[in-house]
Image: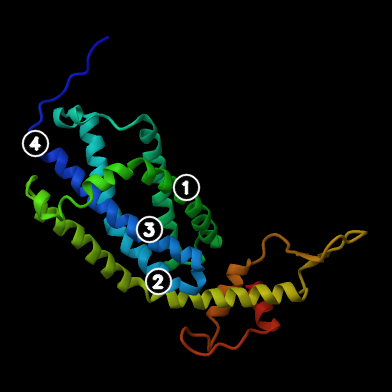
């Protein structure tokens, strides 16, 4: 069996430890923010939507730094860099968990930001994608945290304690990187949080349209009436007509319906007009 050739490392001997410290510090910040984000889901996203959105946006820059630092270690290890080869490979389970967690995280955040900026995009399916992905992501994150708990305790505070931060050069730079990501996340959150009002406005119109369509049959709908009804009547919508998201979007654009003002509930005539296009 032929041994794997390693490339001599041109990086300083402390570069592996510096990368690990940056990963640990960023991971600790992410863990705290993730815990707060999960708490907003437990409390009910709709009741604390602004906080939920702001925390999600603050998470973006630190998350990108964490992805970059971990990817850098993987890249150099598989390029047979001598220093990173001495560090050793990740556990086999982590080699599988890492890419799956990365893909799930990207889907979760991309769907969340898309839902905020364009709620009716892709036929309004972003909400379902975001919700389902969140629970899968939560399971993967719990597994990730359990596996890395010892490393996190060992590395997270090393750049912030006086007796350990001087052991590896560059502690001040790594501190600034972590603080800069938090500042960038806060700036991103403040720049986009105004979209929460527009999203809530559209959600109200969507719920109003849904209630109207469920209370009374309209032309173009047929009643599904079995011979022996076993439950409530259901409305079936013919193919090719506008969905509830389209109805809600049309109602939002009607005259006198602006975010921040008083919005009278739409009547059946308006819902019918929106359905017809």
Residue 204 position (above or below residue 33)? below
Q: Quadrant of residue 84?
A: top left
> Sequence order check: which comes first, mark 4 or mark 3?
4
In the rendered image, residue 109, in percent from the top left (x then y), is placed at: 40, 57
Residue that protrudes farthest toward the front in the picture: 163
How packed mark 3 is, by other alpha carbons closer than 10 Å (few <14, some 14-19, many 20 or more), is some
Residue 33 seen anywhere in this rendered image of the structure = yes
Q: Is residue 184 above or below residue 94?
A: below
Give whichever of 97, 117 is nearer the camera.
Answer: 97
Q: Secondary structure at mark 1?
A: helix
Q: CA distance from mark 3 to mark 2?
A: 13 Å
**Which color scheme does this rendered protein use?**
rainbow
Which numbered disc flags the more N-terminal residue, 1 or 4?
4
- Tally the marks: 4
Mark closer to the observer (4, 3): 3
Instruction: Find residue 11 and name its label.
Output: 4
Image quarter where the C terminus lies is: bottom right
Looking at the image, is mark 2 or mark 1 earlier in the sequence?
2
Residue 79 as seen in the image, left or right of residue 98:
left
Q: CA distance from mark 4 to mark 3?
A: 33 Å
In the picture of the structure, the residue carrying the numbered disc 1 is 139
Mark 2 Cα shell of 10 Å, populated few (<14), some (14-19), many (≥20):
some
Answer whether labels 3 and 1 touch (C-beta < 8 Å). no
Which label was assigned to residue 34?
3
Q: Residue at x 73, y 64 (%)?
A: 237
Q: Secondary structure at mark 3?
A: helix
- Which residue in the structure is indicated by mark 2? 51
Give the residue displayed 40% in from the left and 34% down from the top: 96
Q: Do the numbered discs 4 and 2 sit on residues whose CB atoms are within 8 Å?
A: no
Label located before the other in sequence (3 or 2)? 3
């Amino acid at each position: 069996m032929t041994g794997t050739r390693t490339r001599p490392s041109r990086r300083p001997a402390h570069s592996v430890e510096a990368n690990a410290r940056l990963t640990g510090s960023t991971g600790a910040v992410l863990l705290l923010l993730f815990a707060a984000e999960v708490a907003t889901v437990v409390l009910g996203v709709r009741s604390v939507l602004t906080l939920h959105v702001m925390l999600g946006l603050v998470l973006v820059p630190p998350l990108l730094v964490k992805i970059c630092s971990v990817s850098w270690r993987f890249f150099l290890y598989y390029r047979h860099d001598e220093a990173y080869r001495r560090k050793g490979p990740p556990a086999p389970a982590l080699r599988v968990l890492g890419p799956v967690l990365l893909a799930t995280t990207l889907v979760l955040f991309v769907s969340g930001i898309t839902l905020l900026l364009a709620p009716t995009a892709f036929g309004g399916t972003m909400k379902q994608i975001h919700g389902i992905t969140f629970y899968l992501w939560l399971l993967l994150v719990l597994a990730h945290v359990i596996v890395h708990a010892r490393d996190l305790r060992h590395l997270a505070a090393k750049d912030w304690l006086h007796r350990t931060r001087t052991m590896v050069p560059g502690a001040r730079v790594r501190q600034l990187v972590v603080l800069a990501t938090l500042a960038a996340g806060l700036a991103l959150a403040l720049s986009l949080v105004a979209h929460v009002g527009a999203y809530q406005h559209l959600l109200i119109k969507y719920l109003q349209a849904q209630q109207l369509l469920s209370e009374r049959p309209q032309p173009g709908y047929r009643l599904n009436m079995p011979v022996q009804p076993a439950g409530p009547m259901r409305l079936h919508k013919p193919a090719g007509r506008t969905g509830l998201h389209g109805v809600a979007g049309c109602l939002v654009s009607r005259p006198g319906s602006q975010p921040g003002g008083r919005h009278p509930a739409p009547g059946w005539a308006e819902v019918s007009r929106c359905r017809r296009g």
